[in-house]
Image (tube, helix red, strand yellow):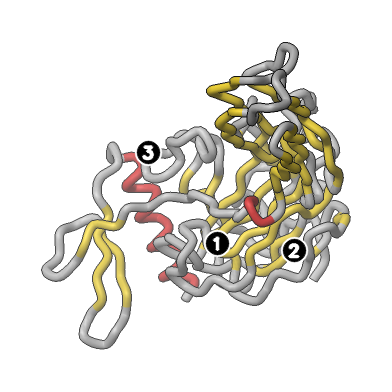
């Protein structure tokens, strides 16, 4: 199993070095799924993305309390992390006073913030406005601190199969500085930095509806977030709102989501202004250089 794992993930690295050569996915007569960089009868090109679907709309709400002549806009943030929000008001008419057309705020974790209140200039006529609302995890004003990340797994040695800027899948702003480490399914994954668990996904199977598969997102004290992707289904042992320490067991590695072989995808992100982007980071030792290195116990 380990040999197959390393071969598959080695294929990922080879493709990243070959100017994003296509990867083909096919299923043989025995139902075994395989991946190759060569066209094969019946195979289809695999489009690989580590996009994350975190369904924040279920936890970040814009509430509008309305009467015919007033409107009050409030944001409720039910996440265990701050969010940056933006409310745009277009087509304003019959509004008393000067109202900004764009309002941005950082809403702390588990809190509500009043954004703006509108009142009719002519009480006998209705307010008119068209709102639009968007948001992003994190506080763009936070200042990241240099931090050498301990390796976030137990066991090894393993190998880095795709690093920052890999053309295979590490080319978009959210994942540009991510690292993929090939490892057998079931490898213990541990927190590389202390922080607050803000989002988890634990129910994706191999393939799955989400390209990122199962994951854990941890908010660090400096406002950055570490994200651990493609975890084994049902293996996540932490919950949203839980404080974790360096070395806390998070889950087990897997092959869920859009993945060409068992591996851990680890990325550090921050809010750069209504958008999450990956940022450069370094492990505190070379990957694959020593046996049995880890930051946690079994």
Q: In the orientation shown, which residue stands out farthest toward the front?
A: 124
Q: Is residue 287 left or right of residue 119?
A: left
Mark 1 in CB contact with mark 3 (< 8 angstroms): no
Disc nearer the start of the sequence (1/3): 3
Q: Which residue is mark 3?
A: 167
Q: Is residue 150 above or below residue 126?
A: below
* Quadrant in which the C terminus is drawn: bottom right
Secondary structure category for the residue under label 2: strand
Badges 2 and 1: C-beta atoms under 8 Å apart? Answer: no
The answer to whether residue 284 is seen in the rendering is no
Q: Position of residue 289 (x, y in %)?
A: 62, 49
The one of 103 and 274 positioned closer to us in this rendering: 103
Does residue 215 lie above or below 277 as drawn? Answer: below
Of the two numbered discs 2 and 3 on the same chain, state the one appearing first in sequence: 3
Give the camera-side residue of 267 and 283. Answer: 267
Q: Residue at x 54, y 38 (%)?
A: 174
Residue holding disc 1: 230
Answer with mark 2 or mark 1, whichever residue precedes in sequence. Answer: 1
Crowdedness near tag 1: few (<14), some (14–19) or many (≥20) residues, C-alpha within 10 Å: many
Q: Crowdedness of circle 2 by 10 Å Cα count: few (<14), some, many (20+)?
A: many
Q: Which residue is mark 2?
A: 250
Q: Is residue 9 above or below residue 124?
A: below
Residue under the image location 65 percent in, 76 percent down? 234
Q: CA distance from mark 2 to mark 1?
A: 13 Å
Q: Nearer the viewer, residue 171 or 54?
A: 54
Label 2, label 3: how many angstroms apart (C-alpha)? 29 Å
């Amino acid at each position: 199993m380990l040999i197959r794992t390393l071969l598959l993930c080695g294929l990922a690295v080879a493709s990243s070095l070959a100017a994003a050569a296509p990867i083909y996915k096919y299923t043989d007569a025995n139902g075994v799924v395989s991946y190759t960089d060569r066209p094969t009868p019946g195979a289809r090109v695999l489009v690989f993305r580590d996009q994350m679907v975190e369904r924040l709309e279920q936890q970040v709400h814009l509430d509008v309390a309305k009467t015919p002549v007033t409107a009050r806009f409030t944001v409720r943030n039910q996440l265990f992390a701050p969010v940056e929000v933006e409310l745009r008001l277009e087509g304003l008419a019959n509004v008393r006073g000067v109202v900004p057309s764009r309002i941005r705020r950082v809403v702390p974790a588990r809190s509500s913030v009043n954004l703006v209140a509108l009142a009719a200039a002519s009480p006998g006529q209705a307010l008119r406005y068209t709102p639009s609302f968007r948001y992003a995890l994190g506080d763009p004003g936070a200042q990241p601190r240099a931090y050498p990340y301990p390796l976030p797994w137990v066991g090894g040695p393993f190998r880095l199969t795709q690093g920052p800027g890999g053309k295979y899948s590490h080319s978009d702003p959210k994942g540009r500085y991510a690292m993929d480490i090939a490892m057998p399914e079931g490898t213990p994954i541990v927190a590389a930095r202390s922080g607050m668990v803000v989002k988890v996904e634990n129910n994706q199977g191999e393939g799955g509806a989400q390209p990122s598969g199962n994951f854990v997102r941890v908010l660090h004290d400096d406002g950055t977030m570490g994200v651990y992707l493609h975890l084994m289904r049902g293996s996540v042992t932490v919950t949203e709102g839980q404080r974790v320490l360096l070395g806390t067991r998070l889950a087990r590695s897997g092959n869920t989501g859009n993945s060409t072989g068992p591996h851990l995808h680890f990325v550090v992100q921050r809010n750069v202004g209504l958008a999450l982007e990956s940022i450069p980071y370094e492990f505190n030792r070379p990957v694959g250089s020593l046996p049995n290195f880890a930051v946690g116990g079994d």
